[in-house]
Amino acid sequence: MKRGPSPTPTAIRRLKGNPGKRAFNASEPVVPVVGLDSDEPPPLIAGDASAAAEWRRLAPLLRRARVLTEADVNALTAYCQQWSIYQHALTQAPPERRVVRSPHDYPVVNPYLTVANKALMFCDRIGEQLGLSPGGRARVAASPEAEDAFKAFDTPHAPRLPRARKDAENGTETTH
């Protein structure tokens, strides 16, 4: 396992002006942003109502922000699964049952709270990678919009007005 902070993506280094003056990674992969069809949950979580609802809430938001790429679909799927586990565990441990009796009749924390806490911890980790927290948004770079090679032809140019020019010999202005 590598030590130290994870490398800053090239897009962010370009935006910052490359303060370290190190060479950019020319071979860094560019992953395409997902399309409108990504707003529906994948089959893996479609049967889980809670996970599917969270997908339908987050996928359009991340797609419009150009953060959800084809490489991030699995991370969002894992996030939605963990969110579903968290919600289910909390329903099994309502406030009046946060402390339960063990088989030996002494009080213990409801095991569902441990499950909920771990699921929420995973949601926090994955959510930061997807930019779902304020600190995570500061570290995530949105994919650039695709360049249109013919964009310059979409809007007509203003008509060119003739320029006035002073004649050097007699000081009068003429148009060309």
Image (cartoon, grey):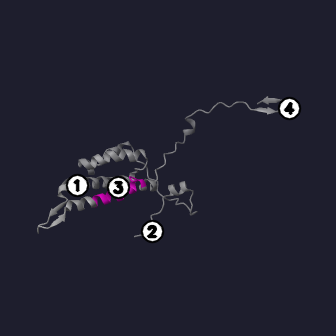
Q: Which mark is residue 4?
A: 2
Q: List the residue tagged with mark 3.
A: 75
**Front position in the image: 6 or 149:** 6
Find out whether the residues at labels 1 and 3 contact each other: C-beta distance under 8 Å. no
Q: Nearer the N terminus, badge 4 or badge 3? A: 3
In the rendered structure, the answer to whether residue 51 lies left or right of residue 107 reads right
Disc 2 from disc 4: Cα separation: 71 Å
Q: What's the residue type where badge 1 is placed? A: Leu
Q: Which amino acid does label 4 sit on?
A: Gly
Q: What stretch is highlighted in magenta?
A: 118-134
Percent across and percent down for residue 166 are 82, 33
Image point 31% across, 55% down: which residue? 78
Gap in angstroms between the C-alphas marked 4 and 3: 73 Å
What residue is pinned by disc 1?
90
Q: Look at label 2 and name its amino acid.
A: Gly
Is tag 4's residue or tag 1's residue first in the polypeptide sequence?
1
The secondary structure type at the circle numbered 3 is helix
> Label 3, label 2: how many angstroms apart (C-alpha)?
22 Å
**Which circle marks residue 171 in the picture?**
4
